[in-house]
């Protein structure tokens, strides 16, 4: 009898060689892996076309006929296998450029076939490259008897698989053969009360119809069930560890609002806090005085005042006898935080020090000694903070800026800096769509600064073409003449033969020629940190008027006098990245501009993306659109985010409503069964253990 965990090589039609290919190319090792390798689309094959009806403009067609003759033609790269296929009304050529030996052995002349593929015209003749083919037995029923051939699943395969004859049709046949061996219903993987409460079909119905749907309605039901289940177990995993952490780890009680905070608030605050900043500080203080360890995500658009919030929360920790640290991803950003904090604090008796890889010798020894004695109140630094020899007297608050630049294991080391784990505040200026936040950071409480400080003018954004360069340079020259500064950003450092992109080296020379009256700095990621810092500092000090850079300036660079951001080859950047770059200007009181430069020949999709940037300055709106257009990608990687298992069918860009339902369901389970011992939930906890068995509990070290 077939088992879910059975090695795929023992399935009919597989064998050792195909099994190795399936594992290497798709990660399919067991029968269960194949079962959950879902189709990526479904093709309606209800219509059979006549060859006389088709032309090269049609998307996909299905033909019924026979092969008249077949042979290998051409030489070298032009070598291909060509079969002449006819249904009596005309002839098309079926063409294979790869896997020719396999095709030559497997096809037969003068035997009825069903052929499916996209027609093209080459040399005045219609051909179909790499078509799907099946012998025509006169029946439209699949072997499993579960679906008609009118609604056929299509599976993603790789070129290597196709060359070995394992195309979509072959995977479909393997899956069909496997389904026939499961005569009994598949075991339910959700508790019956959840299936009933959320009006889901059974797992057995879902898994059979996701591969071979009876009709479009049943397919939608199957997709909804499997998506819900996938998201439910992600959320159950996240919320379970969140609650477990709250129960296990007590927090340092920081209830007192004392002298440091009050002195700063009444005597040093540079401007009135926005309502959003006040709300966020209250939320953080509630966590810090609760007796539970805080794990909070602070989202704030570029320029929203997160650093000020971080300082004020650090002062709360200091007033309660604790130290604070702020960990930044780069030395530039760490130094900028140091300067900003010292400037904000003025002459207050709060000692802020910097620890990066560049801080060496006696200066480093002095900082480490004073840190251990408790004489350093706030330590700002890079990953140097988490080195083993860095010891605090009493670390109460750890703030991680632009946290996506750090690995989870790195951040976990901050927990070891105090006998009681410090409160953790994770900050990001990259707006995170709600569905991503619920998944990537679902175990963190979330605070959002959704207001900009008063006096900030919205950045005026334009999309212009290469041919408008004279106008672009005139705008740059106009701003420089008014005493402003300009960023010009390129996607590449040096010219690439494969990609027709503006590159920084050529761009730097062109800018120098175009603006001989200006001083120009150049910054990119391959420069030594010291060289980079010198150039950045020159620009920050106003010694240079133009900074030519790559995306190293995306995060944290604060030059209020810069009023123009020119982004070359803007089509090469995601919306969120464009928004981050745009956020480097508009930090002063003057009107600022962002110019998105592209070539004229760009796709309609690219124009749509860039128009979103032109129309909106709201980072959260832009992030949502970016997610819809580009998808979630790898969700920042499992090691970055702590995701325990990959999403195989759910899509965070489209399934936000299902995600909320799944999170509500997971919360309900945990509310009613915190000790995980109720009989009705046994199937849930067993299934979660199965899904997690090869994963590390990254979530406990967020």
Image (cartoon, grey):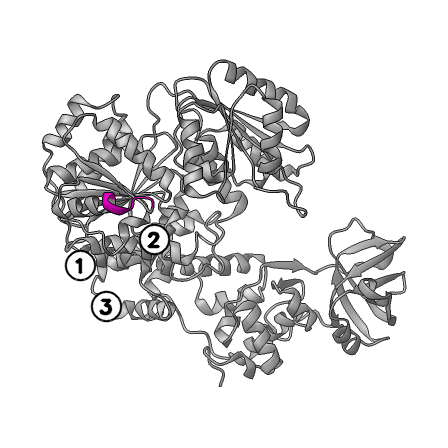
Residues shaded magenta: 358-363
Q: Is residue 644 visible?
A: yes
> Local crowd at mark 1 within 10 Å, few (<14), some, or many (≥20)?
few
The relative height of residue 36 versus residue 246 in the rendered view (above or below) is: below
Cα separation between marks 3 and 1: 21 Å
Sooner in the amino-acid sequence: mark 3 or mark 1: 1
Distance between mark 2 and mark 1 Cα atoms: 22 Å
Would you say residue 360 sits in the magenta stretch? Answer: yes
* CA–CA distance in space, label 3 to label 2: 19 Å
Side of 393 where 553 appears, left or right? right
Residue 163 locus on image (x, y percent): 69, 70
Does residue 81 sit above or below 445 in this rendering? Answer: below
Circle 2 residue = 663
Question: Could you say which quadrant of the image residue 677 lies in?
Answer: bottom left
Q: Which residue is mark 3?
A: 678
Counting residues from the start of the chain, the first of labels 3 and 2 encountered is 2
Give the SS element for disc 1: helix
Give the residue drawn at x 59%, y 27%. Answer: 511
Are there few (<14), some (14-19), or many (20+) residues within 10 Å of tag 2?
many
Q: Which marked residue is nearer to the observer: mark 2 or mark 1?
A: 1
Q: Between residues 553 and 594, which one lies in front from this camera angle?
A: 553
Work out whether residue 592 or residue 214 is closer to the camera in this orientation and state it. 592
Q: Is residue 199 visible?
A: no
């Amino acid at each position: 009898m077939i088992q879910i965990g059975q090695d795929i090589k023992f399935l009919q039609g597989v064998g050792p060689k195909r099994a190795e290919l399936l594992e290497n190319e798709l990660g399919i090792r067991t029968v269960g892996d194949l079962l959950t390798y879902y189709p990526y689309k479904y093709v309606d094959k209800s219509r059979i076309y006549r060859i006389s009806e088709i032309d090269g403009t049609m998307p996909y067609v299905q033909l019924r006929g026979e092969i008249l003759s077949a042979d290998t033609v051409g030489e070298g790269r032009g070598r291909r296998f060509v079969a002449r296929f006819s249904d009596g009304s005309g002839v098309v050529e079926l063409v294979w450029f790869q896997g020719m030996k396999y095709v030559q052995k497997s096809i037969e002349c003068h035997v009825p076939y069903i052929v499916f593929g996209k027609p093209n015209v080459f040399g005045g003749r219609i051909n179909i490259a790499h078509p799907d083919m099946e012998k025509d037995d006169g029946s439209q029923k699949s072997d499993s008897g579960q679906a008609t051939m009118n609604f056929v699943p299509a599976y993603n395969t790789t070129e290597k698989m196709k060359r070995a004859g394992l195309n979509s049709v072959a995977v479909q046949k393997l899956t069909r053969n496997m389904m026939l061996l499961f005569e009994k219903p598949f075991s339910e993987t959700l508790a019956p009360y959840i299936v009933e409460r959320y009006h889901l079909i059974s797992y057995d119905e879902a898994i059979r119809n996701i591969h071979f749907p009876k009709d479009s309605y049943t397919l939608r039901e199957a997709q909804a069930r499997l998506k819900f289940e996938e998201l439910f177990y992600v959320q159950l995993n996240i919320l379970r560890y969140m609650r477990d952490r709250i129960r296990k780890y007590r927090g340092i009680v920081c209830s007192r609002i004392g002298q440091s905070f009050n002195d700063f608030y009444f005597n040093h605050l540079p401007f009135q806090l926005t309502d959003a900043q006040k709300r966020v500080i209250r939320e953080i203080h509630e966590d810090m005085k609760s007796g539970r360890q805080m794990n909070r995500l602070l989202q704030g658009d570029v320029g929203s005042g997160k650093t000020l919030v971080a300082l004020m929360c650090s002062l709360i920790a200091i007033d309660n006898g604790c130290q604070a640290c702020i960990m930044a991803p780069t030395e530039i950003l760490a130094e900028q935080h140091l300067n900003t904090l010292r400037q904000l604090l003025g002459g207050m008796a709060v000692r802020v020090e910097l620890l990066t890889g560049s801080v060496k010798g006696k200066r480093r020894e002095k900082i480490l000694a004073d840190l251990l004695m408790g004489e350093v109140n706030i330590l700002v630094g890079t990953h140097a903070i988490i080195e083993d020899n860095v010891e605090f007297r009493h670390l109460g608050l750890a703030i991680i800026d632009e946290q996506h630049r750090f690995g989870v294991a790195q951040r976990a080391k901050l927990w070891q800096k105090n006998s009681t784990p410090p409160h953790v505040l994770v900050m990001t200026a990259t707006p995170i769509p709600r569905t991503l936040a619920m998944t990537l950071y679902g175990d963190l409480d979330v605070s959002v600064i959704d207001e900009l400080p008063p006096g900030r003018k919205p950045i005026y954004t334009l999309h212009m073409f290469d041919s408008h360069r004279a106008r672009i340079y005139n705008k740059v020259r106009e701003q420089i003449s008014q005493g402003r500064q300009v960023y010009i950003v390129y996607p590449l450092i040096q010219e690439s033969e494969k990609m027709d992109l503006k590159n920084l080296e050529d761009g730097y020379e062109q800018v120098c020629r175009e603006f001989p009256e200006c001083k120009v700095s150049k910054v990119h990621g391959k420069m030594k940190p010291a060289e980079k810092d010198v150039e950045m500092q020159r620009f920050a000090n106003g010694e240079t008027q133009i900074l030519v850079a790559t995306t190293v300036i995306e995060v944290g660079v604060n030059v209020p006098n810069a009023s123009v951001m020119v982004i070359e080859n803007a089509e090469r950047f995601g919306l969120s990245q464009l928004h981050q770059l745009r956020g480097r200007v508009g930090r002063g009181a003057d009107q600022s501009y962002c110019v998105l430069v592209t070539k004229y020949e760009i796709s309609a999709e690219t124009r749509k993306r860039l128009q979103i940037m032109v129309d909106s300055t709201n980072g959260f709106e832009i992030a949502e659109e970016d997610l819809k257009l580009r998808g979630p990608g790898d969700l920042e990687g499992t090691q970055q985010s702590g995701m325990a298992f990959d999403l195989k069918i759910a899509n965070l860009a489209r399934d936000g409503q299902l995600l909320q339902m799944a999170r509500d369901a997971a919360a309900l389970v945990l509310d009613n069964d915190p000790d995980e011992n109720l009989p009705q939930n046994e199937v849930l906890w067993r299934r979660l253990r199965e899904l997690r068995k090869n994963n590390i509990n990254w979530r406990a070290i967020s």
